[in-house]
Image (spheres, rainbow, N blue to C red):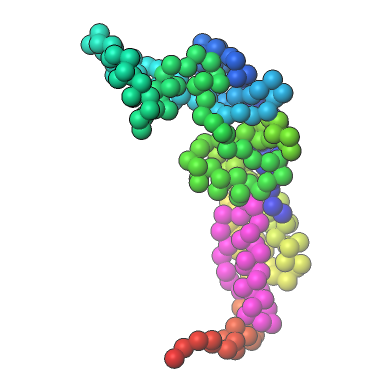
Amino acid sequence: MTSIVENVMTTEVAAVNQDASFHTVAELLISRGVSGMPVLDDDNRVLGVVSEADLLAKEEFKERYYGDDYRPPLRARIRHSAGSEGSGFRKSLGETAGALMTSPAHVVAPDASVVSAARLMDRHGVKRLPVVDAGGRLIGIVSRRDLIKVFLRPDKDLEQEVREVLRGQAQVSVTDAVVTLTGAYAEHSQAVTAISLAENIDGVVAVRDELSWKHDDIADLPVWGGA
């Protein structure tokens, strides 16, 4: 079984409209105890994500330019906004969620696998992904914490699924999500396949191979290449 995002996502999502004020965004982040949330248009479509870091850009800008009661001339501020730190500068001037957010948002579909969601988070360095329907409308959110829920499956459930996948061709025991396989197969390749199938079940932490086989058909395979 491959777990999908829909099975682990949170459906009660803290989100704001693009026109929400800076104060509203800050208040919601604090009251809901989250570090970021989706920003939506009037049709509930995800436009971006606003985070604590986006709000702190305003304070950072104040510290950088007003710490010593110095306000740079307009020309200098325009140059800064066009430079490498332009995004942070523009956010420091933002007054609404739409102006503060990071866009476009990295999103995921509800039928995506938890593995693909985890890879997407890792690739983009984000801690959460808005979950959207085919029209791009928000239906939930999935976080890193949600994704590790698959590793909390009861040992009994994992054992039953491994047995079903292997069709009773090996003895199976599971302790703390670690699967141990024992028994004998006719071919070495069959044992290798059994291990691979068990490893790919969501929630399995590791597989301990105690299998044996009668014939090493893998050793019989021709070796290609060479001089």
State left or right for residue 9 relative to residue 208.
right
Going by the picture, which residue comes out furthest to the bottom? 227
The residue under the point 38% across, 24% down is 81
> Which quadrant would residue 65 be assigned to in this image?
top left
Going by the picture, which residue comes out furthest to the front? 75
The residue under the point 59% across, 87% down is 221
Tell which of 156 and 104 is nearer to you.
104
> Which quadrant would residue 218 be assigned to in this image?
bottom right
> Which quadrant would residue 58 be assigned to in this image?
top left
Is residue 56 at least partly visible in the picture?
no
Q: Is residue 43 above or below residue 132?
A: above
Q: How many marks?
A: 0
Tell which of 39 and 131 is nearer to you.
39
Quadrant where the N terminus lies? bottom right
The residue under the point 61% across, 28% down is 47
Is residue 171 at least partly visible in the picture?
yes
The residue under the point 61% across, 38% down is 107
State left or right for residue 92 relative to residue 10.
left
State left or right for residue 75 relative to residue 58.
left
Q: Is residue 132 above or below residue 63?
A: below
Which x, y percent locates residue 20? 58, 14
Segment tinted magenta in the rendering: 183-211
